[in-house]
Each structure stands twice: as structure tokens, then as C-alpha cells.
Image (cartoon, rainbow, N blue to C red):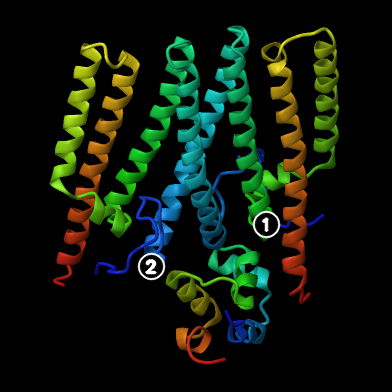
Amino acid sequence: MAKNLKLKSARAAMDMSQQALAEAVGVSRQTINAIEKGNYNPTLNLCIDICKALGKTLDEIFWGND
Amino acid sequence: MSNLYNTEETENNSASLIDDFQLDEMQKAENYKIGFQMFKVLFYIVMFISYAMFIISSGRNTAMMVLSFVLYACGWTVYIIYAAKASAKGVMNPTFVRNNTKDWQVFAYVCFMLLSVILALCDIYNVYQAVIWSFTMIMLITVNCFVRRNMAVLKKQLEEDGE
Amino acid sequence: MEDKTTLASGTIFDEAGYDEMQKAENHEIGFRLFRIMFFVVLLFAMVFIIVCSNTENLAGTIISLVLLATLFGFYLLYAYMTAKRGIMNPKFAKSWSGTWVIIVYAIIAFLWVVRLIDDLCYGKELFDVSPSIMWIILTVEAMLMCLCAKKNNKVLKKQLEDDEEE
């Protein structure tokens, strides 16, 4: 699985740490780390929660080519 | 040392290893996958050991025969529970379902059960062997029922959406 | 909807040809049953050891020890596989990663080994010494569990450090 660089840059743009994002969406930092590295496919609900936390759409973070 | 897990510092810091409490979705998914693989292998090992116990104790050691039956029954009970839970969601293995919905199978299981009882009454089989056979046939019939339930659940799931 | 391909075995546990939803559901069911089955069979194995020891049943003693060792092998394997990915239960990992755990269990294991050697020197049979063997298995397993918990912490730390931004 490819790395999710869009998530990482969206998080960086909000000046949010992995820990802060993890707390915001109710998962562990390990999971956010795994998603960014492309080691885990989050459920749709988690994708939506992450987008809401970062103020982005699903397309902007999880869909389309890197 | 920082709290690697970000767990709450509660008074109760105990948990078993095979526990999904306080795991998030990724951790749960990975643990479930590992647990499932382990379960498959453990099940067959337990059934093999119960059979080995039966063979070793057969006719000589009543206590061990009873214990072997207890272990055998535990294995089958877990199998039935798996079948029940999987069929409740309609996620039973399709090939398994296809191979276990024949009507003649239930008839054959009932015949085998009656045969084992008759053989025991005629002193050809000992009582314990008859009990094991009858119990196994009852379990197979129960699994067959759950297979049919799986089909009914799946049909309902797909019908509700008009497809 | 039906998969027309010939699946490998078609046993109830076979997940060949499953999609992600079906796999996820089956995995969860299997996990929960693994947990129940493990503890039930463990209880059975321990009762079995005691019964065989008291009734001087050699074959039963051997089988019960093999069963116990197999069960703990599974427990250890589970611990290792979760530790390798850093996904061990956090509370469990936290409780078991202290170095003092290894020390305490090493001492207990040593005491039971001494007891076992002493019993064997006095010519005791396997069914007499099976409780000692059981305790040695338990304590060695506990020590290895501690090592797995430490490995889990290391893996988790490395995963999070690799991406350290602060």
C-alpha cells in the first residue's frame, strides 16, 4: 500500500501532531501512523472522522493519485 | 517513561493478553486476524488430542474416557457456536454451505445415530463408542441446521434490498 | 453472488474467496472463540494433570502435559505475533514489561526445577512430578511473555519514533 502523504501534509498544514489527531478522532497514535505509512486501510467511518478533524473532504485526503 | 499507549492511568491495570478492551479499530482488526488463525489450529489440535485420549484409554480407564469425551464435547461446542455466529450474519464459507445443505445428509446422520444405538444394544459397540457416535451425529445435524439458517439470512439480506 | 471457483478446502473456517467484510466478521468470531476455548481447555488441562497424577495414570499424565505445553505454546505464539506488530493489549503489555517480572518468575522456576531434580533422584514417577513440570512450564512461559511485552514496547516505540516530528 502506498503512503498517504495527503493525510500527512493536511495534518502538518493544521499544525497538528499525530497524537493530537489521534485523540481528536478517538484512535491511537499508532493507527494514525500506520495510515500515513500505508500499513492500514481505515474504515469509512474513521476516514470521515479524520476528514472532519482536518477540515478536508474524502477526495482531498483518501482518494485520487498521490 | 512516557505512556506509549496513551492509556488512562486507572487503578485497574490488569488485562489478559487475548483481550480487545481499549483497542482501537486497527489494533482490533490485527488481533482478530491473529486470533482467528490461532483458533483454527487450536480447534483441530484439541480434537486430535481428545481422540488420542479416547484411543489410549479405550476400555481400560473410565476416568480418562470421560475426560476425553468432555474435551471432545468442548471442541464440538465451540464449533457449533462458530457456526451459529457465522450463520447469524450470513458469512459462512460458501463452499462449506454448498456441501452441507443436502437433505440426504440429515437422513444419513440420523441413520448412523440409530445404527450406533443398535450396535451398542447388541453389544457390538460399547456404550461409550455409541455415545460418541450419537453425539457426533447430533452435532453434524445441528451444523446442518445452521448452514440452512445461513442461507436464509443471506437470502433475506439480499431480498431486503430488492436485488 | 456465489463464488463458482473451487475453494481449497471448504471447511467452515476457510476464508479463501471471502471479501473484506466477511473476513472481518469471521476474524472477530474466531478471536472471541479462541479466547473462550483457550481458557476452557487450559482449565481442563490443569484438572486433567491433577487427576492423572492422583490416579497414577502415566499415559494420561503425558497427554495432559503435552496439552498444557501446546496451549502455552499457542499463548506465546499469540503474544509474539502481536508483539511483532506492536499491537499487544496495552494494559497487558504495561503489566508484563517490568524486568522484575522476569526475575520473580526465574526464581520460582529455579525452585521448581530443584524440586523436580530432587524428586527424580528419589525415584519418583512421572505422575508424581507432573505438578512440578506444570509449574516449570507456567513460569518459563511467564518469563517469555515478559520478553514479548518488552518487544512490543520496543516495536511500538520504533514505529512512533520513525515518524517523530516533535
Q: Which mark is residue B6?
A: 1
Indicate the quadrant where residue C114 lies: top right
- Residue highlighted by disc 2: C19
Q: Residue at x 69, y 57 (%)?
A: C84
**Is residue C119 or residue A29 the one in the foreground?**
C119
Quarter of the figure with the N terminus of chain B: bottom right
Image coordinates for residue C98, horizontal then vertical, percent: 80, 42
Image coordinates for residue B58, horizontal then vertical, percent: 44, 17
Is label 1 in a helix, a strand or a loop? loop
Vertical placement of B64 versus C96: above or below? above
Q: What amino acid does circle 2 point to? A: Asp
Q: Residue furthest bottom?
A: A65
Q: Residue at x 28, y 50 (%)?
A: B87
**Is residue B63 or residue C32 the one in the foreground?**
B63
Vertical placement of A60 versus C126: above or below? below
In three-dimensional space, the C-alpha distance between marks 1 and 2, rounded to whole angstroms, equals 33 Å
